[in-house]
Image (cartoon, rainbow, N blue to C red):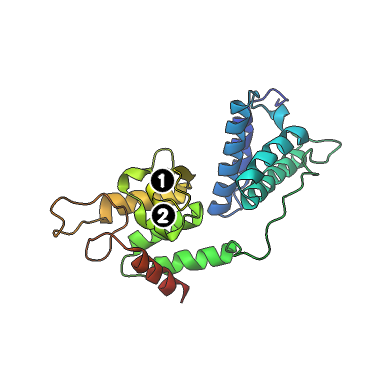
Amino acid sequence: MRNKNTPLDSVIDSYLLHCHDLAERTREFYRDNLSHFVRWLRANEYDAVLGDIDPNVANQYLVERRRVSPYVGRAACASLKAFGSWLARVGIRHEHGRSVLADLRAPKVPQDVRRPLTPAQVDAVLKAARNTRQPERDHALVSLALDTGLRLGELCGLSVLDVNLRERFVTVRAETSKSKKARDAAFGQQTAVALDRYIRDFREESADLPNGTDRLFLGLTGLPMTSPGMGQLFTRLRR
């Protein structure tokens, strides 16, 4: 019988198993956000057990996520609230049948900036990326862009060595970052599969590069993609 001392990892695994009716990308969204919450708990000397699903603890976590960006904070809040609702619905952790995280408040996001794509728009963009002259590259590129939100120049500047498929993140080096600070950006399982297939089976360098290149995304000629060239690709996908 699960109780407050049950490891949170195992409860999250059960939750994701019960989310079989959700789209795979939605399950990845919840998995990534909840896994980050567990890592945060451990880094802050919590036990990372079911009892840590508590509004006070969750609000401390959300304060930190909001500092990254309002969108990151909103995603973290949505994931925790969905998890809390499931815990209450199946009777694992609740307060008189109500989710203990029901009163978490998502941060407001700016209304005068570009908004994230809807799930239907994401599916449409990925479908378009599979119908180009280089479908494996473009599907991997678009999936990575959707998961990480990297800027065009950051995507263009990535090298093969910047990609960690095992841990599922890319490193944006300081020299390619607009902020001039290095950072890591996580991506999901589907993007990992797309990148693995592109890198190992389809990425082919031009013979005109005697010393080769470590740039991740290459054009039809096998030369590194440029920012204008990548911009034209996204323009074609939008059409």
Q: Is residue 129 visible?
A: yes
Q: Residues within 10 Å of mark 1 (few under 14, many from 20)?
A: few
Find disc 2 in the rendering and name its residue. 154
Q: Residue at x 31, y 47 (%)?
A: 160
Percent x, y for residue 43? Answer: 59, 27
Q: Are marks 2 and 1 in contact (CB under 8 Å)?
A: no
Q: Which residue is rendered at x = 83% and y = 41% of the image?
A: 98
Instruction: Residue lying at the far bottom in this picture: please name it.
Output: 239
The image quarter in which residue 12 lies? top right
* Image x and y of residue 57, in percent: 72, 32
Residue at 50% x, 68% y: name it.
Answer: 124
Residue 93 appears in the figure? no
Mark 2 or 1: in front is 1
In the rendered view of the protein, which quadrant contains the N terminus? top right
Residue 235 image label: none
Q: Quick one: 80 or 153, which is closer to the camera?
A: 153
Asked if 192 appears above or below 60 in the picture, the reply is below
Image quarter of residue 7: top right
| Left/right of residue 75 with respect to residue 148 in the rendered view | right
Tell me the CA gap for discs 2 and 1.
10 Å
Q: Which residue is mark 1?
A: 174
Secondary-structure class at tag 1: helix
Q: Is residue 218 left or right of residue 193?
A: left
Say above or below: 78 vs 229: above
Which SS class for mark 2? helix
Q: Nearer the viewer, residue 156 or 32?
A: 156
- Horizontal side of residue 177 vs 102, given as left or right: left
